[in-house]
């Protein structure tokens, strides 16, 4: 496996950044995860737009112009012979002697890695359904920025895993679900409407979320963007998560509550199929 680190393509095992990289010391950086399917990068434009927005919000200089970045992403895919998998790319404010304030002269760091994904396993997981475990949302107030500062997400996901779950559903002080630790959260309400929280600074604007909305609209499924409580989710007809890594994956259990009949919902599975077809 080959990684890209600040201008060089290097063997993955030797890919490293400086100890004074601000990503390492302050989590002062942003990232993207893109799915690769049949050798094609999915939703590249929207992912690069979101990266630009995250960089702008944190006043981190882009490491290079977009056309150059697109070449690097493709080169990492090519050197890894990546057909189906994930591309991870991360930009930090660069290497400088440790000081909280922005460094005067540091150049942004760019790291790109690739990882194959077993699509058969992912499909089997979707057909089985996963368990979500609720967890208090203790993150900061700018979750719309895709920052590498993910400690609350890490703790929530680990708690979910230790409770036998696949994803953590984060819950705000009012009892409403914000999103998953690395996914957006959806339900199908008792009237058959698709419900997901509206975009605000409490959640990340998922690219899969946006694409799925288009797919759902075209399929004539009604979408309501509003927050929902844990209680409503537990009583919902269906629940599911979306992300570049999981596409659309049904949630069949939330904490100890079984969703619907305990099998993946028909709306979620149909949307998963339509989403995968639309991305081909
Ligand atoms: N996570 N919400 C959060 C907090 C996320 O970290 C992600 C993505 C999403 C879904 O966004 P998208 O559909 O653009 O992947 C929602 C990536 C996959 C990760 O951290 O691995």
Image (cartoon, helix red, strand yellow):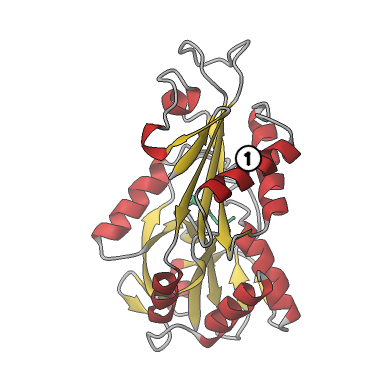
Query: Eyeballing the image, is 241 above or below 14?
Result: below
Where 98 falls versus 275 (above or below)? above
Numbered marks: total: 1
Across and down, in percent, residue 278 comes to 68, 73
Which residue lies at the image location 49% right of the left edge and 66% below the top edge?
229
Q: For the residue with label 1, is its CB less than 8 Å from the closest atom of ligand 1? A: no
Q: Secondary structure at mark 1?
A: helix
Q: Where does residue 157 sit, x and y in percent of width and height?
A: 36, 54
* Quadrant the N terminus occupies: top left
The residue sitting at 62% across, 63% down in the picture is 209
Residue sitting nearer the eye, 106 or 132: 106
Q: Residue drawn 50% across and 49% down?
A: 80
Along the viewing direction, whichever of 206 and 200 lies nearer the viewer: 206
Q: Is residue 23 visible?
A: yes
Crowding at mark 1 (Cα within 10 Å: few <14, some 14-19, many 20+): some
Left or right placement of residue 218 versus residue 11 in this view: right
Residue 40: quarter of image: bottom right
Q: Looking at the picture, tell me which residue is in the foreground, 132 or 218.
A: 218
Looking at the rendering, which quadrant does residue 51 occupy?
A: top right
Q: Position of residue 20 (x, y in %)?
A: 44, 17
Q: Is residue 189 among what the camera can see?
A: no
Q: Is residue 159 left or right of residue 58?
A: left
User: Which quadrant of the figure contains the C terminus?
Assistant: bottom right
Residue 272 sits above or below residue 168 on the image: below
Q: Residue at x 45, y 57 (%)?
A: 116
Where residue 36 sits, quadrant-wise, is bottom right
Whole-percent x and y of residue 128?
38, 80
Question: Mark 1 — residue?
Answer: 72
């Amino acid at each position: 496996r080959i990684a890209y680190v600040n201008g060089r393509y290097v063997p993955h095992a030797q890919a490293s950044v400086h100890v004074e990289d601000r990503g390492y010391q302050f989590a002062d950086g942003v990232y993207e995860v893109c799915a690769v399917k049949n050798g094609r990068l999915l939703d590249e434009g929207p992912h690069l737009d979101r990266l630009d927005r995250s960089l702008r919000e944190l006043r981190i200089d882009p490491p290079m112009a977009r056309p150059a970045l697109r070449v690097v992403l493709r080169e990492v895919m090519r050197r890894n012979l990546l057909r189906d998998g994930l591309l991870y790319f991360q930009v930090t404010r660069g290497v400088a002697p440790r000081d909280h304030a922005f460094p005067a002269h540091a150049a942004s760091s760019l790291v790109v890695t690739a990882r194959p994904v077993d699509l058969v396993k992912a499909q089997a997981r979707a057909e089985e359904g996963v368990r979500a475990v609720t967890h208090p949302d203790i993150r900061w107030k700018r979750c719309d920025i895709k920052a590498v500062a993910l400690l609350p997400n890490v703790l929530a996901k680990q708690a979910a895993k230790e409770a036998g779950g696949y994803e953590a559903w984060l819950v705000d002080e009012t009892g409403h679900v914000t999103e998953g630790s690395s996914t957006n959260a959806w339900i199908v309400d008792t009237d058959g409407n698709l419900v997901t929280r509206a975009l605000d600074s409490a959640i990340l604007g998922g690219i899969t979320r946006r694409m799925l909305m288009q797919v759902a609209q075209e399929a004539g499924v009604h979408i309501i963007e509003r927050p929902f409580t844990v209680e409503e989710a537990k009583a919902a007809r269906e629940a599911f998560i979306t992300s570049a890594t999981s596409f659309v994956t049904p949630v069949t259990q939330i904490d100890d509550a079984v969703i619907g009949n305990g099998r993946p919902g028909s709306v979620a599975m149909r949307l998963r199929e339509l989403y995968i077809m639309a991305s081909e």
